[in-house]
């Protein structure tokens, strides 16, 4: 991810495989920042980042963890 054009920094707060405490509050798992020339480039970069992120969610009462990318996360 850090090698993407336009991305200036990339910081993850959660490690791969790390279990996060449950609850109803949102928790940041990372942050990215950068500079792009225009709005279209911004949208393209966000879509690319979302496609590269993959999160596994194990929810109580579900037999298997769910895996989603960044774009799918908001639909849960």
Image (spheres, rainbow, N blue to C red):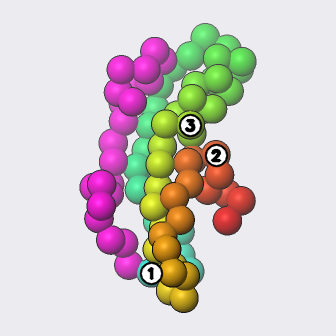
In the displayed structure, would residue 28 be above or below residue 54? below
Q: Residue at x 67, y 65 (%)?
A: 76
Disc 2 to disc 1: CB gap under 8 Å = no
Marker disc for residue 22: 1
In the displayed structure, would residue 60 be above or below residue 50? below
Disc 3 to disc 2: CB gap under 8 Å = yes
Q: Residue furthest front?
A: 63
Q: How far apart, in angstroms, are the residues tagged by discs 3 and 2? A: 7 Å
Q: How far apart, in angstroms, are the residues tagged by discs 2 and 1? A: 21 Å
Q: Residue at x 51, y 81 (%)?
A: 63
Q: Which residues are magenta?
A: 1-21
- Label 3 neighbour load within 10 Å: few <14, some 14-19, many 20+: some
Does residue 28 show up?
Answer: no
Q: Is residue 50 magenta?
A: no
Does residue 49 show up?
Answer: yes
- Label 1 neighbour load within 10 Å: few <14, some 14-19, many 20+: few
Q: Residue furthest top?
A: 37
Which residue, given by chain and number where applicable, does mark 3 sit on?
A: 51
Q: Secondary structure at mark 1?
A: loop
Which comes before the other along the chain, label 2 or label 1?
A: 1
Tell me if 75 is positioned left or right of 53 in this view.
right
Q: Residue at x 38, y 78 (%)?
A: 21
Q: Nearer the viewer, residue 48 or 6?
A: 48
Tell me if 17 is positioned left or right of 59 in this view.
left
Marker disc for residue 71: 2
């Amino acid at each position: 991810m850090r090698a993407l054009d336009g991305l200036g920094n990339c910081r993850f707060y959660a490690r791969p495989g790390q279990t996060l405490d449950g609850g109803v509050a949102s928790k940041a798992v990372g942050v990215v920042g950068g500079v792009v020339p225009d709005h279209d480039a911004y949208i393209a970069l966000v879509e690319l980042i979302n496609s590269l992120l993959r999160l596994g969610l194990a929810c109580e009462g579900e037999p298997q963890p769910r895996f989603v990318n960044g774009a799918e996360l908001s639909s849960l």
